[in-house]
Amino acid sequence: MAAAEGTPHPRLRLHRGFPSHYVADLHDLMIYVPPGYDRDPERTYPVLYLQDGQNLFDGRTSFIEGRTWQVREHADAAIRAGEVEPLVIVGIYNAGDRRLAEYTHERDWQMGGGEADEYGLMLTRELMPWIGSQYRVRREREQTGLGGSSLGGLVTLFLGLRHAECFGKLAVLSPSIWWNNKSILGYLNERAPQVWERPKVWLDVGDREGHRTLRDAEKLNQRLKANGWRSGETLHFERVHGGTHDETSWANRVRPMLKFLFPKAG
């Protein structure tokens, strides 16, 4: 899979059609490398994997044309300001009509879904080793993050718990806790005692996303703390003033999220 041309910036590399034995769909990838990546061929970097990759960098592919998370711009600014450790960011494009299936951990009797296990195997057994062979990323759990919003936030939390040996940092933005009667909360209670080292979690929700979404996020925050996450250390929960459930609002949260999960060392 050679890097394709035509990306919005020279430090963005597009790889089309990543194949998998675990899921039926091919996934395009957009990879961000930090300033100085090509000048220092010996240096290795932390890595953050993000769901819904077509919404992160390129306005031509985003859900609402022209509106993205502006991940490159915010990461560049945070790195150059000395707030954030230079890192590689992997945007995993979703599967379109099958996004709901791959991003949900259990089957809902009305809506279907429930293929996050297979998606997680693709991610941990195929994609992450391939990224490690193509890019100079750190392999340690403590240097590896996973993130997403909405259903992407839901699957991030699920896979972060299920594969806690792989991910030491989770970015859970506006998560769809409501899925299948909030069953993710029960999974958290069941799984947390088996997770010996808590991954660092950024959790947020906009105060204009609706009462249910806000209430569910607050409940998740309480469940995380009850299961051993510590506010300000392994957990940051933020109610975003004026925050809405869309790419423009999530873009405003990228820089503080990176600052919490990947702070500049020393």
Image: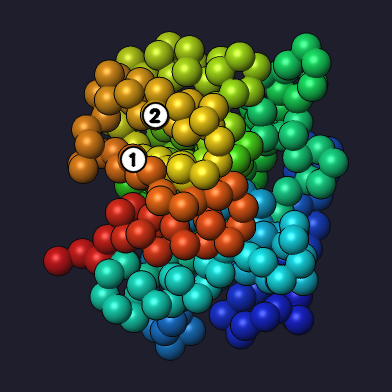
Residue that carries the numbered disc 2 in the rendered image: 218
Q: Secondary structure at mark 1?
A: strand
Residue nearest the viewer, comparing 107 with 167 = 107
Q: Is residue 251 above or below residue 235?
A: below
User: Could you tell whether 68 is left or right of 79 in the image?
Assistant: right
Q: How was this image coloured?
A: rainbow
Q: Amino acid at mark 2?
A: Glu
Q: Position of residue 227 (x, y in %)?
A: 30, 19
Q: Quadrant of residue 122?
A: top right
Q: CA distance from mark 1 to mark 2?
A: 8 Å
Say which residue appears at 43% left-offset and 82% top-offset: 35
Image position of 226 (left or right of 160): left
How many marks can you see? 2
Q: Which residue is mark 1?
A: 237
Return the residue found at the far left: 266
Q: Quadrant of residue 124?
A: top right
**In which quadrant is the N terminus drawn?**
bottom right
How crowded pointer 2 is (Cα within 10 Å; few <14, some 14-19, many 20+) is rated as: some
Label 2 SS:
helix
Regarding residue 1, the answer to whether it shows in the image is no
Whether label 1 touches label 2, CB < 8 Å:
yes
Q: Image quadrant for the C terminus?
A: bottom left
Q: Position of residue 123 (x, y in %)?
A: 61, 42
- The residue lying at 21 percent from left, 42 percent from top is 232
From this view, report whether residue 181 is shown above or below residue 57.
Answer: above
Which of the two labelled residues, at mark 1 and mark 2, occupies the earlier sequence position?
A: 2
Residue 81 in sight in this render: yes
Q: Residue 4, image x and y in percent?
A: 75, 75
How dense is the environment of label 1, judged by Cα within 10 Å: few (below 14), some, or many (20 and up)?
A: some
Residue drawn at (49%, 51%), measured in percent from left and top? 243
Seen from the viewer's position, the closer of residues 169 and 172 is 172
Residue type pointed to by label 1:
Phe
